[in-house]
Amino acid sequence: MSLHGDTVLGIVLALLPAAAALHHLADRDAPRRYRNAAFWGAFALTAGAGPFLPNLVNGALVLLMVALATIGLRPGAARSTTEAERTAASDRFGYRLFLPALSAPLLTFAGAVLLPKLTWHGRPLTDPHNATLYGLTIGLLAATAFALMLTRPPRDAIVLESRRLSDDFGWAMVLPQLLAALGGIFAVAGVGKVLAAYTADVVPFSSPLIVTSLFAIGMAGLTVLIGNAFTAFPIMMGGIGIPVLVRHLGADPAIVASLGMLSGFCGTLVSPMAATFNLVPTTLLDLRSQYAVIRVQAPTALLLLLVNILVLLVCAFPGAPR
Amino acid sequence: MIVIGFGLGLNPMLVVTLAAFASAMAAGYGPLAVVSMIGHGFVENRLLSLPLLALAMVGLLERAGLREQARKLIGRMRGATSARILLFYLVFREISAALGLRGVGGHVQMVRPIVAPMTEAAQPGADEQTRRLLRAHAAAVDNIGSFFGEDVFVAVGSVLLIRAVLAQHGIDVAPLHVAFWALPTAIAALLIHGARLLLLGRRLRRGKAS
């Protein structure tokens, strides 16, 4: 059995939930320690050992996580530093504290550019099509090492802090991956095709205003349902964008495609299915309502959708100013 | 079904799993086959979670006072208001995304440890409801800035996807042409959301933000 590149990255990824699981397990006075240890342990297993386990076992681990998240993880408090200690520490370290966080993107970028160039006996050390992921992993590990060298915490602090932030995330940490996994199973794409076929029959007789609005609003609406503009895009382009707007009405394909994608992003801003952007920050920032971020974004999303329709109408059609 | 589940306030993980079960069973798959499909998809997509490795670093910095330091920075800046900090971060995030630097930012690395504490610290004495609103705004500017900035960059995933989809239909377009037509919306996003932030600032000054 050879170690595929993705396998190595998965094992590195597993370190974080594994640390959280072990810390919970050792937290003897916490009331729900086994429940939390099981949740993070299951996540670590799928990330690190998933490729070696039968699909059925991985699926059972996922269902275990869903069940534990549903009854509620409610972890005990992690004993990090007190506010007084943190204020004192911030006096000591000052603005240097910003450096590791700010260096992470630079290290990531450097890793993505340099890693594919490294070779061992004439063979590339890393899988070139995954250069970005390797860069990200190495950049984040280097930035973590930087933070350790700068702050010199007690030896177990990295495990404790991994657990504390995992707890703050809670089940939201797993949700984007779960949504991606289920994406193929949903029949939403089928709905989109039906909708697109129907409009393709009706709209050729309509004005650019109506077709353009249908296209942009359809992109946004389908993205709200799926949570991902990239999935909605080929459906709407194949259904309305290309046959009606481009072929029938003679619109510029690059403008139609670009504004269509951006209309999809307007949908992402108000979709609870776009968990990474809209639900994860609500747990991370302790916002109470799952819709707190969506509510703030909705007016901007709506106005930008109108802007997109306007730009399409003014610029995409023949005779329009280019 | 998903809409109903979210409407009832059920755990989103439960809602999407049940929905997947329902649609796969309706398509004629047995329960064990669905469990296997979920397990397979979950493992296939596990590298999506790689950015989470930043959590250990952010946790270490937070315990050494990163958030406290971000608040102090605001205390030393004159004229720093919550609205101006959000506006500054929106512009910074959108321009860096337009230059292809999407990694500069994000909810884990920037919003929680730096932007949110700074925004809150610039509005001392705010009640808990207002503070939550400010934190939600901090998350929103990160999303809006990165979404509408990134498409201006030529080598980003969405521009590549656009070209691939058009190529399937026998249409060839220059990446630069696609990226150029992301500019009007990018500028509109800055103007519209920027204006909303200024209005938020005015409401905060009058003490009735939420």
Image (tube, grey):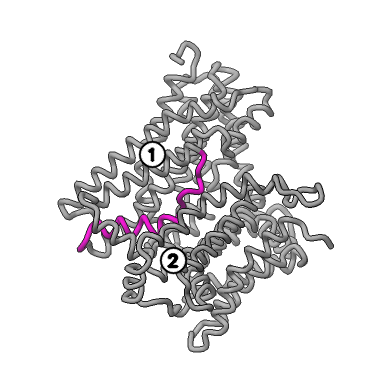
Residue A78 in percent (x, y) is at: 45, 78
Task: Please tell me whether mark 2 or mark 1 is closer to you in this view.
Answer: 2
Where is the N terminus of chain B found, in terms of image quarters? bottom right
Residue closest to the eye, B150 or A42: B150
Q: Amino acid at mark 1?
A: Leu
Q: Is residue A257 above or below residue B145?
A: above
Report the quarter where the C terminus of chain B lies: bottom left
Whether the residues at callouts 2 and 1 have beta carbons within 8 Å, the answer is no
Total number of numbered discs in the rendering: 2
Residue pictured at 54% horizontal, 64% vertical: A145
Does residue B86 show up magenta in the picture?
A: no
Say which mark, if any, is on residue A78.
Answer: none
Q: CA distance from mark 2 to mark 1?
A: 37 Å
Q: Residue at x 37, y 41 (%)?
A: B91
Local packing at callout 2 (Cα closer than 10 Å; few below 14, some 14-19, many 20+) is many
The answer to which image quadrant residue B37 occupies is bottom right
**Would you say residue A153 is visible in this rendering?**
yes
- Callout 1 crowding tier (Cα within 10 Å): few <14, some 14–19, many ≥20: some
The image shows residue A40 at horizontal and vertical percentages of 59, 72
Which amino acid type is marked by label 2?
Leu
Using the image, tell me which numbered label, if any, was put on residue A302: 1
